[in-house]
Image (cartoon, rainbow, N blue to C red):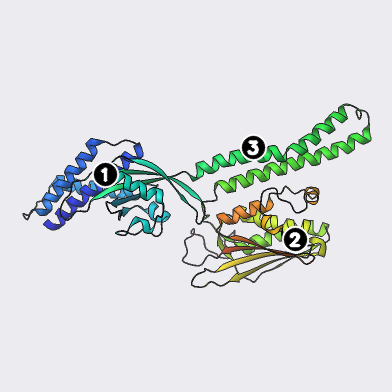
């Protein structure tokens, strides 16, 4: 019992010092009174650990234990990543957010094993030498790009036998959403001003004509009003697609957590587009094995992905009279998890090889005139790409001139035991029933 109490005193003082340091970094100031108080507590704990005399548990000691528990809970529930390292830059403590960001993070292992950022590691060395806090940046590229501001600060602690020397705390603040929002605003203005210029110029020209030479020409008025309506609809579609793309890019770094059935989504889109296919004289079919095809995803976003691919096949690849949607499973291996593959195949004119790498660029069109005539905005495949990035999937394109095109969506399959919401893939579930 005495040994346990002595260890609790040392541990409690260590955690208290860490918490005070994190609070100081978050506030941007260093409270000397807090740090000195924590250091005194650590020294007292060390002295107690060397003492061989029995210790009586007092109400004050019970209160200190409760505060220690509260301090540990506070550290665990800080939403931003917090990491504590010693003078050798070996990890001594990390909260849940830090472990989620850096899966390779392990206690009593060098921080460089999990965080390979020269700016951060050099910053720690500088703080160890100078003792002054500093800020630097850290950017992750996989699975999506995320940006963090890293605040690094020294924690003065008294040395004591049997007690480590945690000297540096790292507090990582996620700036991804703020930066994406700023980029979204800039891109939206640039793209909108460029793409809206042509339809706005057409509208202005027709309005001037109707106000002038064609003022009393009923036939010209009807013709011009029809063209103006088409241009206005084009601008509406363009704004809608730009807003959709911006929203997806803003959340691209946040993986979805809802459980949805890819087969039901594909079936719903085929049923919805059947009238459009019939109007164009195209047979639209679906081939999919029975049973659910479970993925973690945003249902509305995946609907938009399949809708864009099916509409593109009907508009630009329906010359052969057949568009086929199919679903299949790809079994995984030791290095690759199982995947689901949704393919949209057409028998149209195909796409030249030089165009394929650029298909997902904003406003890139293989045939500009045909695209605009069909009502396309040039943003459909860009939306598909960024949506699949968010879902940790990918788009594969196969095409040959004169032999049609295959667009394949590859998504990781959800298996029992994987992290998901509480809903199961039960046929009785309202989102997962089958026709």
Residue pointed to by mark 2 = 352
Give yes or no for contact between labels 2 and 3 (Cβ–Cβ under 8 Å): no
Residue under pointer 3? 189
Element at label 2: loop
Q: x, y percentage for residue 98?
A: 38, 52
Work out how far the residue at label 3 is from the one at label 1, CA to CA, in angstroms: 46 Å
Badge number at residue 291: none
* Residue drawn where x is 54% and y is 48% of the image: 251
Q: Mark 2 against mark 3, which lies toward the viewer?
A: 2
In the picture of the structure, the residue carrying the numbered disc 1 is: 155
The quadrant in which the N terminus is found is bottom left
Mark closest to the chain's N terminus, 1 or 2? 1
Total marks drawn? 3
Q: In this view, does 332 lie to the left or right of 243?
A: left
Q: Which quadrant is the C terminus positioned in?
A: bottom right
Is residue 275 visible in the rendered structure shown here?
no
């Amino acid at each position: 019992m005495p040994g346990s109490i002595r260890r609790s005193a040392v541990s409690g003082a260590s955690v208290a010092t860490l918490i005070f340091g994190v609070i100081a970094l978050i506030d941007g100031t260093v409270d000397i009174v807090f740090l000195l108080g924590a250091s005194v507590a650590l020294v007292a704990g060390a002295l107690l650990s060397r003492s061989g005399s029995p210790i009586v548990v007092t109400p004050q000691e019970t209160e200190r234990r409760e505060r220690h528990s509260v301090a540990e809970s506070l550290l665990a529930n800080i939403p931003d990543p917090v990491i504590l390292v010693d003078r050798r830059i070996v990890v001594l403590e990390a909260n849940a957010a830090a472990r989620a960001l850096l899966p390779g993070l392990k206690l009593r292992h060098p921080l460089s094993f999990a965080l390979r950022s020269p700016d951060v590691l050099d910053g720690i060395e500088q703080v160890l030498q100078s003792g002054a806090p500093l800020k630097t940046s850290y950017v992750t590229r996989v699975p999506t790009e995320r940006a963090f501001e890293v605040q690094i600060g020294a924690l003065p602690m008294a040395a004591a036998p049997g007690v480590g020397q945690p000297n540096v705390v790292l507090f990582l603040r996620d700036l991804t959403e703020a930066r994406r929002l700023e980029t979204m605003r800039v891109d939206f203005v640039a793209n909108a001003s460029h793409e809206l210029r042509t339809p706005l110029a057409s509208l202005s020209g027709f309005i001037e004509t109707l106000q002038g030479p064609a003022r009393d020409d009923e036939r010209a008025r009807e013709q011009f009003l029809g063209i103006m309506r088409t241009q206005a609809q084009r601008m509406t579609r363009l704004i809608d697609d730009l807003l959709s793309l911006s929203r997806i890019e803003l959340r691209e770094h946040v993986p979805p957590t809802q459980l949805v059935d890819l087969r039901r989504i594909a079936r719903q889109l085929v049923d919805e587009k059947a009238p459009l296919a019939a109007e164009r004289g195209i047979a639209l079919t679906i081939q999919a094995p029975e049973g659910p095809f479970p993925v973690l995803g945003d249902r509305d976003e995946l609907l938009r992905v399949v809708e864009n691919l099916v509409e593109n096949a009907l508009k630009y690849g329906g010359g052969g009279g057949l568009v086929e949607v199919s679903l299949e499973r790809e079994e995984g291996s030791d290095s690759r998890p199982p995947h689901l593959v949704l393919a949209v195949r057409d028998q149209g004119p195909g796409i030249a090889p030089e165009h394929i790498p650029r298909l997902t660029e904003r406003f890139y069109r293989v045939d500009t005139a045909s695209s605009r005539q069909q009502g396309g905005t040039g943003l459909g495949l860009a939306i598909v790409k960024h949506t699949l990035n968010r879902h940790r999937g990918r788009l594969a394109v196969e095409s040959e001139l004169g032999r049609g095109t295959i667009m394949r969506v590859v998504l990781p399959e959800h298996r029992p035991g994987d992290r998901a919401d509480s809903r199961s893939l039960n046929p009785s579930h309202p989102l997962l029933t089958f026709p």
